[in-house]
Amino acid sequence: MIRSEYLRFLQSLTAPTITDGVRKIANLVLNHLEILQGLSTSHGQRIKKIAEIAKEEWYTLSEVIDIKEEETEQVASMNRLARLKVGPFRGFSRQESFDLDSRLVLIYGPNGTGKSSFCEALEFGLLGNVAEAESKRIKSTTYLTNAHVNSFQLPIVEALDAQSNVYTLEADESLYRFCFIEKNRIDNFSRIAAQLPAKQNELISTLFGMDSFNDFVQNFTNDMDDRYIDLIGIKQQELLQKQTALSGQYTIVENSKKSLIDLSEDESSLAERYKPGFTFPELIKETSKEISFLERDMDKPLPTKTGLTLQLMIAKKEIIDELSSRQQAQERDMNTLRGELSFKQLYSAILAMKEDSATECPACKTPIGVVQNNPFELARRELERLNFLSELEESLELTKCRLSEELSNVYQFKGAITCGLDEQHPLALFFAKCNFRPTLEWWGSMFNENGGILWDQLLGRIQQLEQFDKHLESNEFASIEKKKRLIELKELNKEIDILKGRRQEIERNLHEANRVIASFNEENKELLVQVEQEKPFILINKEISNSYSQFVHLLNSYAEKLPSELVADLGSTVVELYNAFNRFDTPMELLASINLPLVQGEQIKISFKIDPDRFFDALHILSEGHIRCLGLAILAAKNLKENCPIVIFDDPVNAIDDEHREAIRRTFFEDKHFKLKQIIMTCHGEEFFKDVQNQLGSVEMRESKTFTFLPQVDEYHVNIDFNCSTRNYILAAEIYYKKHEIRESLTKSRQALEMLTQKVWRYLCKHGSGCLSLKHHAPNSPIGLRNLTEQLRKQLSLANFVHEDKQAVLSSLQTLLGVDGDSREWRYLNKGTHEENDREEFERVTVREIIDALSQLDRVLTDGSHQPASVLINTMENRKNLN
């Protein structure tokens, strides 16, 4: 499948617009197809292999697509398959020969008996491959080899042409691929329909067995980039890296020059900010000099202020004078009241004695009660009167303390006043005379000696100190300004250092870049030669890469268009077949039209006969059974459209649900569609096998081929019954008759009549009225064969029923029933079926008449297409309910 489809893809590459490189890649893939099939996109397996082969074979690969023209005369000449010789092959451990020279070949066998091996032999013989092997990625020889004998031989398929000449068929996938209808594809079609919409794009591909080809296509990586093939060159890449580094050096030179210009502007701006007209070197020199000067100046200690002023000293003098005057006045008052003070002391002493002698006079010891004046009360009253003396004493003490304090304060000025004076200076001598204990006399000596000159000297000295303090204040302000200036200069110096560092860095980079540039060509002389040598190989690699990308694009486009090409113009045939498969459904379930997807991503759209203009998503609205029917209809329609001479159906029992099997049997074996085709069908259902043989009729089954695949017994080989018993009741009856097994012949005859009455009933429904009056003995009892046959004869006998085959059908029933309702033939049908001891022998002539009547009835009815009896019963019941 993969090879055949790939060859068809190659035919699309013959257009003149396709480059030679693309054709080379296409031929490369074809030449190594078996190897590449087993490789995927995982870890770049396939693309790495393609790149490896392309580099080795590019000069020898052909750019010509050499595809032989399709030989279509085989289709025109082949009429049917005649024989299959197969083995060793899969389940066949030795060669077997199958005679297929018949329009119908039916093969029955339980699961696992080798039917699939038979179909795969036909598939390999007709197509040259087996899709199952490709889907499992197993080599064909490995997959098709019989494991028990470890051997494999190609199947030989013989065919008949239109003149019945036998010839050996050559495998041609393009001619015969639509001859196969496989159950696995229908199963996968229904399963994918239930999956995500993205997965449903694969529906048509899956149905036509394109899974393996799609998988093959999807495992081509889209682009062959430098991960898989060298598109630059190892030496070129090395050179580019170095040139990149070198271009970086040129960039450094260019940027360094620009940076130096910018730096010079920054330096000039900084120098101009310091002093207009200054250059940057002058700035560096000047700031360094000024910073050094300020730092030395700031390191010198500043003198301490005295804090003395004339105003302060005069104020001190005034305070001392006032306190001195107050002290003198208070002392005079105290002297005046000295006597009173003695009495106060006396009275205080009396009160102090009260605690010791409260009951008697402390002076005369007279009891208190008899004295004229209580001494204690008298002392208390007099002390209250003399209380002002205490206040005067306290005030005097306070004045003395304050005066001493003020004098001490003046003495504290000694250090500031005498600092720098000679020891013999009057002021120095004045303070030295105090001896650390300033007194009023010491203070007064300053005014009393030499007419107060010393006081004038003191004031002069303080005035000097006051001027000195003012000078210090001026120096402190200047120091603060110097600190600010020093801070400003240091910040400026930081900016200078930054600019100096920038210049050093730029000049260093510029020097190094110029050195690298100067030495590059000399150092890489050999590398430059190697780069030139590898250029032709890189050009080839680029051609390979570009050709590969174009090839993958074309291959993907081809794969995407395949489904639409496969289903083109199938719509009306698909609808006709789908409705035939569902002929027993209600009319509202039958299709009016179908739109099959023509581009990727489109849905399968259907409309129903009851509303033909309204379309639905088929996968959304149809049941799984109907989706299977749709898949079968598409495959069958493709077989018809391609005018395939045969249709090979692998196990329809497994592919289709029970409800649709009868309609599908009738579509394939009764309807017109496949009348001229050879049908090869396998099935595992014995009832289906039996129903097909009886549906076709004895005439056609006599010309058909049947095989039975049986379970293996004593060897690992397919067990085939080439002379299997027919399941057609009439043929079986004739065979038993010829063998003189009369009872068995009658049993098969009765079964034939049971089958034929259903056909007669359908015949009546098609050409007249199928309404019958039937008797039932119980609700679930079956229809009596006698009763049914009589009612059919009665309906056929009506004058208003007219048909060209009426007399032939009626005469056969009359033969079996008898004109008067009784016949020896009918008794034979009953007695031949039921067990009975010691009965008389059956007459062969009568049995022959029964078989002939059944054969005549079968021949007349075989060409009809009528509804089954079950449908007729339901129809009759519905009519009764309506009445």
Image: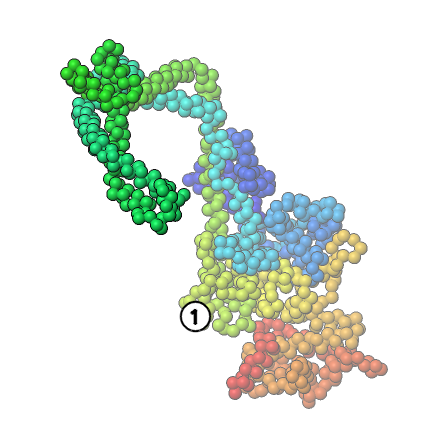
Residue 293, position as x, y percentages in the image: 27, 14
Give the structural element (helix, strand or loop) at label 1: strand
Q: Say left or right for 398 vs 516.
A: left
98 vs 213: above or below: below
Residue 364, position as x, y percentages in the image: 36, 42
Residue 46, position as x, y percentages in the image: 55, 39
The residue at 77%/80% (across/down) is: 834
Residue ranking furthest to the bottom:
820
Q: Say left or right for 508 vs 207.
A: left
814 vs 673: above or below: below
In this rendering, does residue 378 appear at all?
A: yes
The residue at 72%/51% (across/down) is: 92
Viewer-side residue, 593 vs 297: 297
Q: How many marks?
A: 1
Residue ranking furthest to the right:
838
Viewer-side residue, 436 vs 346: 346
The residue at 66%/59% (across/down) is: 101
Q: Which residue is mark 1?
A: 611
In this rendering, does residue 573 appear at all?
A: no
Q: Say left or right for 120 vs 349.
A: right
The colour scheme used here is rainbow
405 vs 828: above or below: above
Residue 72, position as x, y percentages in the image: 54, 50
543 vs 849: above or below: above
Q: Quadrant of residue 504?
A: top left
The residue at 54%/69% (across/down) is: 582
* Structural crowding at the residue carrying mark 1, measured as other residues with C-alpha within 10 Å and reported as few (<14), some (14–19) or many (≥20): few
Q: Quadrant of residue 614?
A: bottom left
Q: Amino acid at mark 1?
A: Asp
Viewer-side residue, 274 vs 840: 274
